Amino acid sequence: NNTLGLPGPREAVAYFLAKHFMFPEQRDMSFGEALGFIQPGHVAFGSGAASLLSHLALSLADEGDAVLIPAPYYAAFDADLRINAGCVAVAVHSTNPAMGPTPDDLEHAATLAEAKGLRVRLLLITNPNNPLGTIYPPELIKSAVDWARSRKMHTIIDEIYALSVHNGRFESALRTLNNDLRDDVHHLWALSKDFGASGFRIGTLYSKNQRLLSSVANLNIFSGVSHPMQMVVSEILTDDHFIYSFLENSRQRIRYSYELCTARLDEMVIPYIPAKAGIFVYADFSSLLPEQTAEGEARFSQLLLDAARIIMTPGLAQHDRKPGMFRICYCFVNPEVLEMAMQRLDKIVGKIRRWHWDNLKAESLSDII
Amino acid sequence: LQTLSRRPLSVLSSSSSSIAFDTMTATPPAFATATKPASAANIRSASPTAVRAANQKLGNNNMFSKLWKSHSSSSRNFSFLPLRKRSYSISSVPSLVVRESACSSSASSCDDSISSQLSSASPSARRFSSSANGSGSKLSSSRGRAAIQLLPTYLIDARAITQYSPSTPEGALQLSVAENQLSELPVKGLSGILENTQAGGIGTLGNNKEMRLVDVLSTLASSTIARPYDEGARAMNVFERDMIYYQPTQGVPSVRQAMAEYLQGLLVSPTHPSLSAKFNPDNIVLGAGCNAVLENLCMVLADPGDAVLIPTPYYAAFEFDLVARAGCHIVPVNTLDHHDMSVPSCKVPISPEFYYPNRSSLEHAYTRAVEETGRAPRVLLLSHPNNPLGICYPPSVVQECIDWCREKEVHLISDEIYAGSVYRKERRAEGGGDEGSPTFVSAMALGSDSDTSTATEGEAGLGLGPYIHLVYAFSKDFALSGLRVGVAYTENEEILMPLQKLNDLCQISSQTQLLVERMVTANAIVANDEESDQSQKFVDVYLKANQDNIRERCDTWQSCLDEVGIPHLPADSGLFVWMDFREFLPSLTSGTTEATESLESKEQRERQLYLSLMKEYGLLFTPGMSMRNERPGFFRCVFTAASQEEFELSLVRLRKFVDAMRS
């Protein structure tokens, strides 16, 4: 049999991707129709998306090769690409990160990497984006894939937040590309975010590259998914009624917490990138730093932790160039706790503005919690 | 101490300290309300309790629970029902793919032109090389292409031939895959399962003498059960909310606790009941299968190119597990010529001692490793009980390995994946004066220094020191290879953190972990005619029944071998008999002696016999040369991979083969 997954569960994933990623408007699409679009043989399970990403890097790039990732990006990509595959993540900076990298941005980053002696083999795009919470326009995905193809590179499309879109409207790359993945576009998804089921350790890969799938099959010997869990998941993914109602419910809750969080940021006059998707918002605290450096960002983080017991993901850890950017994961806590956190944040922001860093005394911070 | 390779340190330092917690929609711990300063990293390890603190009801958990139950009920034709072969089963298929063949490439034809590939590549030639042939397609990497070409030739041969089935009765009988189909039989003596702690048991399948392992798992999966090692011992569902989210990468704490207890009972208590030293749950790492945890152990103990010593013959897929990504260089420990006696010729049984590693053979391999890699070897890997030999090393042999490893600062990894399949508990009379002593003594018991650990009453673990490590899995003793649950145990504190980090990429679903926890902690209701000890663990009842089944098969197979006069090792554990077919090898070309025969010639002669057994007599054994055996003509028979009908047919075919060859 096959370490890529049991036959039934692979069919279920194919059905799920066709129905919810390619044709979300066709709610009554049948199982057979869906499998006409996505072949179960092109689908694989892995022990989490990270593990599949590691297999892709190992299979498609050689040790020391570069993987381009639009910055800022999910901090753990560095380790996921490096631990087994030995690949180097290279940040792609752009003038407007929220809109995604243009071909010029990509070319610029690739040229810089090559100047350092790296071979640039892969492009990894997370859409909807983590940490920005934005959705790249379809044209951008198209142009990025075209750019990668022009350089004979592979593109990995990570859509792990595809179903956590606030208004429910998201165009998957599978649709944008009209499912024309050829041998060089590979799609990742997992249950960890859209279903909050990170403890399941289940990621999915969709690729039409048979040699790649054969390679992943061998590598999956180190990261297979338990068969009973595959069966459970296949039942979930094919239960349309559950999926639709769960996702709608989930989106409402995400929106509620997002609005709660951003209303507070508005009150504090903290700029942020308006999020359309995901479970976080990317906010600009740079005006509050003691200095516009990595040390300044670190001091601010430490102050939040010590005085307010708040942890946010610092931007520099996510390869942002500008100090003071923070990702706030507003869905990691329930709304009551979020409200409390935002109140504390409001207090400490007020104190920093009032006292400045030089005059922040222990006693003036003692009433935050 | 040279206890750590350079690799994991760089892994650790390269990883960011900031870990995303993007669990959506709900509850987990408060980034805003941590009661003490905490880094993102220790929030992660603290999450189960913190998650519990937050309390928001979500619809999805109920949904998941319902599904798990529906899959666990026997009304569905998938889930735990062990349909044979390519079906949705947790027990039937995967051992071929995962533990045994380590490959999934499609087979080409059974063409003699590939015969030389049987094993002529050096044991370490299989690493995904990034340098060789790098000029190929720009659309794939050289190691990516290498990853799909790892199938041993004998498996390509085996896949190309029609295998036996009721509709193809002339097909070859599969006796080469280390799979135990006897585990599908009803568990003898078992009549139900008790709830762990309080009343109101879950033995809904009680008083049923036909209860099988899969029935027990289904019952456990769909029950609500108090977990003995969970704080507060609340009754809980497998799909409890806590378990939906990220867990510590090395495994759910209560599961590691249960595993520690299980390993103690399996490996230490039977021979060392009064040992105060205990397995420490903090030193356990649970990963997706034995392959995964073994690879990770090698990653943290050895750098690419470092040598790993393995006594021959050895489980062929070690060459995938250790070489493919970890890049280790395997140096075989040849044992036959390191004993006082000389190896007997064919028809005279080779005694087990010839296969025991000793100081002489270890030193020899050590020197060879230094010659080949320019530095000292890092690891000695023991398969104990041994695959493919089907025997346990005597305690003195394991002790010699332990002592040698500690002296030489070489790490000993004891792969005890067959520890629950030791079906002869006492050594037979062999003139060595150790008749009646236990057959299997774990390296965990022998390596334990109870003096140092009693100081803290078991908290410190077994007192193994930094050089002794264990791997175990449920794939063999329970035939649960489809669950993908492997265990690594080490008391080397330096590698523990790197191991946990590497485990990021091969974690087991929490639900599967909980199922295993329930299985190893469940108490059995035993049938009346058995010992009526109510405190019997289910695993003990199951393992005993399974061992009885294996022994029965083994006895039948060995009697047949004895009758037809094929020498073999006296098997006591595992699923195999190691057989000496040298008598049937094609003869040497003139001018060549056994001593001067080339490797190619050895492989060629053995493969001819292998193909003849397979094609003309319909018997599929594992050829010894594929397991780096020193001499051609030895085969491993897996007598548990066949159905009863197939097994009986294989006896008939074996007799036919012997008769034909001798006439």
Image (cartoon, coloured by chain):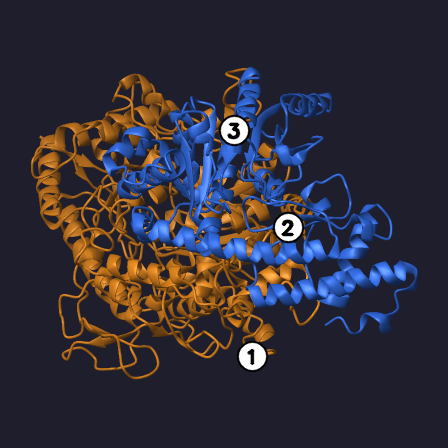
Q: Colour of chain B?
A: orange
Does label 1 lie on the same chain as label 3? no
Secondary element under disc 2, as helix, strand or loop, is loop
Q: Residue at x 33, y 53 (%)?
A: A242
Badge 1 vs badge 2, beta-carbon distance below 8 Å = no
Image coordinates for residue B13, horizontal then vertical, percent: 69, 47
Image coordinates for residue B69, horizontal then vertical, percent: 27, 62
**Chain identifier, blue in the render:** A
Residue A319, placed above or below residue B576: above
Q: Which residue is mark 1?
A: B457
Q: Nearer the viewer, residue B377 or B80?
A: B80
Compare marks 1 and 2 and give the one earlier in the sequence.
2
Residue B471 visible in the picture: yes
What is the chain identity of the residue bearing mark 1?
B
Does label 2 lie on the same chain as label 1? yes
Q: CA distance from mark 3 to mark 1?
A: 63 Å
Q: Which residue is mark 2?
A: B4
Label 2, residues with CA under 10 Å away: few <14, some 14-19, many ≥20: many
Residue A279, placed above or below residue A358: above
Question: Comparing marks 3 and 1, which lies closer to the viewer?
Answer: 3
Side (left or right) of B246 relative to B222: right
Q: Nearer the viewer, residue A24 or A297?
A: A24
Image coordinates for residue B173, horizontal then vertical, percent: 16, 38
Q: CA distance from mark 3 to mark 2?
A: 48 Å
Secondary element under disc 3, as helix, strand or loop, is helix
Disc 3 residue type (three-letter): Pro
Disc 2 residue type (three-letter): Leu
Secondary element under disc 1, as helix, strand or loop, is loop
Q: Which mark is residue A138?
A: 3
